[in-house]
Image (cartoon, rainbow, N blue to C red):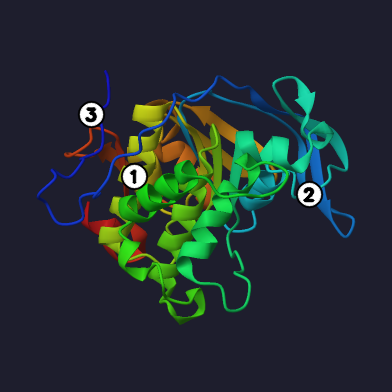
Amino acid sequence: MTRPAPHQPAADEPGAPTSGLPAAPAAPHSLRAESLTLAYDGRTVIDGLDLELPDGRITAIVGPNASGKSTLLRGLARLMTPASGRVTLDGRDVRSYGAREFARRVAVLPQQPVAPDGVVVSELVSRGRHPHRGWFGGRSSDDDRIVAEALAATGTADLAGRAVSELSGGQRQRVWIAMVLAQRADIVLLDEPTSFLDASHQLELLDLLTESNRELGTTVVMVLHELNLAARYADHLVVVDGGRIRAAGEPARVMTAETVEAAFGLECLVTTDPVAGSPLVVPIGRYHRGER
């Protein structure tokens, strides 16, 4: 059964994007991990993992704390050097790409990005255009238009002149997302992009990433903490546990009570989300176990 697309607000609804994301369709790319092992200080976190990310789809990586999901994303983003194995983009080791060449293809938002001291919002978002500029770094009218569109789409245009350091956590997160959108990469890797956002802004952000995927063909890969949001928005779900992949595939096949209990130690029921038709995890807990 085809899952309904997540709700997109109408133009006059609260939270609706004020601008679309017009651009050329994303080019097809193949991003994969091959026998990938990643370690910190000699401690193996990801252990001989193989993973191919579906092109032009939304992949959510989930797993318990300390399972290795954020480390895996860092490896895919070439923020870590593998202890063994490799990550390839279009058949080439990601480390063989120059920084600008890689950034034109892959945009990365780590879990706790740090803005330069004193930078204002418009400056930070415009940094997403750096990989596309010539050697002399001149800013074109196209760059200005794309930055304005990214600010409008994330609802941050009114913050353009504010220092990033003055913003709330939720505002800051939306500004970072605007920078990623301005980069216009074909693949976007995001680590916990809904951090610091309230429920309304979480949905708004995930709707925006879905819009980019559906309209532009952007491949979106994101680590998410909330299982039900992951199941609702992902086309492809990867459950990481103990540095290995416990399950991967369509959410309806992967998000089962057995998988959730095995990976998270969480007794639950899995039913159907009445809005999206995706799997819905209902935790049981000790107090209510006897009431079923």
In-image side of 277 versus 85 (left or right): left
* Of 196 and 279, the residue lying toward us: 196
Residue name at image x 41 percent, y 72 percent: 161
- Mark 2 and mark 3: Cα distance apart in space: 36 Å
The disc label shown at residue 80, or none: 2
- Mark 1 and mark 2: Cα distance apart in space: 28 Å
Residue 46: give x, y in percent of width and height: 74, 44
The disc label shown at residue 225, or none: none
Instruction: Specify the quadrant of the image occupied by residue 8.
Output: top left
Q: Name the residue tied to disc 3.
A: 4
Q: Which image quarter holds the N terminus?
A: top left
Is residue 223 visible in the rendered structure shown here? no
Q: Name the residue tied to disc 1.
A: 208
- Mark 3 and mark 1: Cα distance apart in space: 16 Å
Counting residues from the start of the chain, the first of labels 2 and 3 encountered is 3
Residue 164: give x, y in percent of width and height: 49, 74
Instruction: Specify the quadrant of the image occupied by residue 256.
Output: top left
Residue name at image x 55 percent, y 19 percent: 28
In-image side of 232 versus 76 (left or right): left
Which tag is nearer the camera, tag 1 or tag 2? Answer: 1
- The amino acid beneath tag 2 is Met
Most extreme residue toward the bottom, as rendered? Answer: 166
Residue name at image x 23 percent, y 50 percent: 18
Counting residues from the start of the chain, the first of labels 3 and 1 encountered is 3
Is residue 220 visible in the rendered structure shown here? yes
Label 1: few (<14), some (14–19) or many (≥20) C-alpha neighbours in 10 Å: many
Circle 3 — which element?
loop
